[in-house]
Image: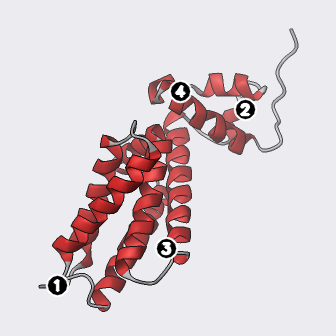
């Protein structure tokens, strides 16, 4: 039997894509660099050039997820129908919940790695970028008098927790029902957040 080749066109990207599929199908405990190498058609040592161990692969996978989610959130905010805070928060909510439902295993991994004391500086930066994106419409809404409060952090944490919980509770719900319910959740948030 011939040895498997060591080189691959873009092995790092192929390993991350394969790991994401395996994560969704079998969970993080089933991920194996050796198995991913076999699937990519390279030697079992080849992934070591990109990931020193499984934890490094999980960090890279989480980083990919945070970058993808943040990019989608930024796009949703930048292309919202109008600049009102409620419209922008609803656009952000739709995007976040869609990602959370479509990529539930990846999102779980992202949050697990985020809280790991061994998380890489790159992962910490990606989390900060995500948080900045979530806070942006809150700050704008406060500046425009649409959202009460001086410190946007607790408001953004409330919105984030509501959306994350909503996604968890509605993972198996039809997209139409999710959309209807999500709009109602944002309405309730805004009625509770509006200046009095």
Q: CA distance from mark 2 to mark 4?
A: 23 Å
Residues at circles 2 and 4 in contact by the CB criterion of under 8 Å: no
Residues at circles 1 and 3 in contact by the CB criterion of under 8 Å: no
Q: Residue furthest top?
A: 1
Mark 1 and mark 3 lie on one chain; the one further toward the N terminus is 3
Relative side of 154 to 118, left or right: left
Residue at figure coordinates x 50%, y 43% from the top left: 102
Nearer to us in this view, 184 or 131: 184
Mark 2 — residue? 46
Mark 1 packing: few (<14 Cα in 10 Å), some, or many (20+)? few
Q: Position of residue 119 (x, y in %)?
A: 42, 50
Q: CA distance from mark 4 to mark 1?
A: 45 Å
Mark 4 — residue? 25
Mark 3 and mark 4 lie on one chain; the one further toward the N terminus is 4
* Circle 3 SS class: helix
Total residue callouts: 4
Q: CA distance from mark 2 to mark 1?
A: 58 Å
Relative side of 122 to 169, left or right: right
Q: Position of residue 143 (x, y in %)?
A: 31, 91
């Amino acid at each position: 039997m011939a040895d498997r080749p060591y080189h691959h066109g873009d092995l790092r990207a192929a390993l991350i894509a394969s790991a994401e599929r395996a994560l969704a199908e079998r969970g993080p405990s089933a991920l194996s660099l050796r198995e991913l190498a076999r699937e990519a058609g390279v030697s079992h040592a080849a992934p070591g050039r990109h990931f020193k161990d499984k934890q490094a692969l999980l960090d890279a996978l989480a980083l990919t997820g945070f970058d993808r989610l943040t990019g989608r959130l930024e796009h949703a905010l930048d292309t919202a129908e109008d600049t009102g805070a409620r419209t922008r928060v609803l656009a952000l909510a739709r995007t976040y919940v869609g990602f959370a439902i479509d990529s539930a295993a990846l999102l779980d991994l992202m949050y697990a790695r985020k809280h790991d004391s061994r998380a890489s500086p790159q992962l910490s930066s990606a989390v900060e970028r995500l948080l900045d994106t979530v806070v942006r419409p809150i700050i704008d809404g406060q500046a425009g008098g649409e959202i009460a409060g001086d410190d946007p952090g607790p408001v953004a944490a409330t919105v984030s927790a509501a959306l994350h919980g909503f996604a968890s509770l509605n993972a198996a719900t039809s997209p139409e029902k999710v959309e209807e319910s999500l709009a109602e959740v944002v309405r309730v948030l805004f009625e509770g957040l509006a200046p009095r």
